[in-house]
Image (cartoon, rainbow, N blue to C red):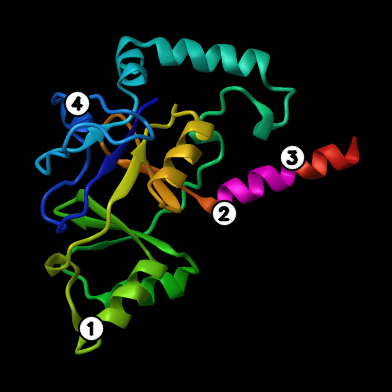
Amino acid sequence: MSIFVSEPGRPIGTRLPEAFRARRVNDVTELTEGHAINPSHSEATDAEFQQAANSGRHHRALEEYGATAAAEPRAERAYLPVSMICSPALYSVPATATISNAMALMEEHGVHHLVITAEDNIAGLVDLRWLLDWLHRNRANAFDQNLVHMELPAFLTASPETDAHQLARLMLAHQLNAALVVDPNGKASGIVTSTDYLRLYASASRHEGAV
């Protein structure tokens, strides 16, 4: 159920957290500043949950969740796995693509987020607002700029079993409006955006109104 933040960087190789590469993960405090960031690796924001996931306890938690919380409105459940609210619709472009290519793909599919890949590895996550801001600050030949030469923004990754409420707090803390859901094999399996949370709580409000 871990949540990780990958620091800004160029889309070279993989920028996934070390937990998805079978390497050591450091523990940091969820919403407060801890030790200095090591740019050579990503930090886990909830190492206790990572240990639980590795021991198989998250599977039991999911079973208990399904048995006890099925009748509750999703927004009010004490534990709500991200897999219940994330969208499986993901679109990606290689790091060699230009900003023009990326924006054209967004417009074609009506999405605001793209996964950036480097040799089939996850190398970043960008949104339309970030691209537009970059274009505003770099006007000369900006549309023809290749993503591989740019420092992409920080991005959050979570596992399907991550608690959606906790992920929302981390998105707010890092001022990010999306998080990438990554399976145990290090492959992107979905995306959670602020729109998903708006839809979730709007649905809960309709339920309360009906009652």
Q: Which residues are magenta?
A: 196-204
Which secondary structure lies at badge 1? helix
Q: Please indicate, yes or no, whether residue 122 appears anywhere in the rendered image.
A: yes
Q: Earlier in the sequence, mark 2 or mark 3?
A: 2
Crowding around mark 3 (Cα neighbors within 10 Å: few <14, some 14 to 19, many 20+) is some
Q: Earlier in the sequence, mark 3 or mark 4?
A: 4
User: Which residue was labeled with disc 4?
Assistant: 25
Q: Amino acid at mark 3?
A: Ala
User: Which residue was labeled with disc 1?
Assistant: 142
Q: Is-magenta flag for residue 200?
A: yes
What is the number of the mark on residue 204? 3
Q: Measure the alpha-carbon separation of dots 3 and 1.
A: 43 Å
Q: Earlier in the sequence, mark 2 or mark 1?
A: 1
Instruction: Report the residue that reaches farthest toward the bottom.
Output: 140
Relative to 114, say whether 202 is above or below.
above
Q: Please indicate, yes or no, whether residue 191 appears anywhere in the rendered image.
A: no
Report the side of 178 relative to 122 (left or right): right
Q: Residue at x 56, y 23 (%)?
A: 79
What is the number of the mark on residue 195? 2
Q: Mark 4 near mark 2, Cβ–Cβ under 8 Å?
A: no
Q: Earlier in the sequence, mark 3 or mark 1?
A: 1
Q: Measure the alpha-carbon separation of dots 4 and 2.
A: 30 Å
Which secondary structure lies at badge 2? helix
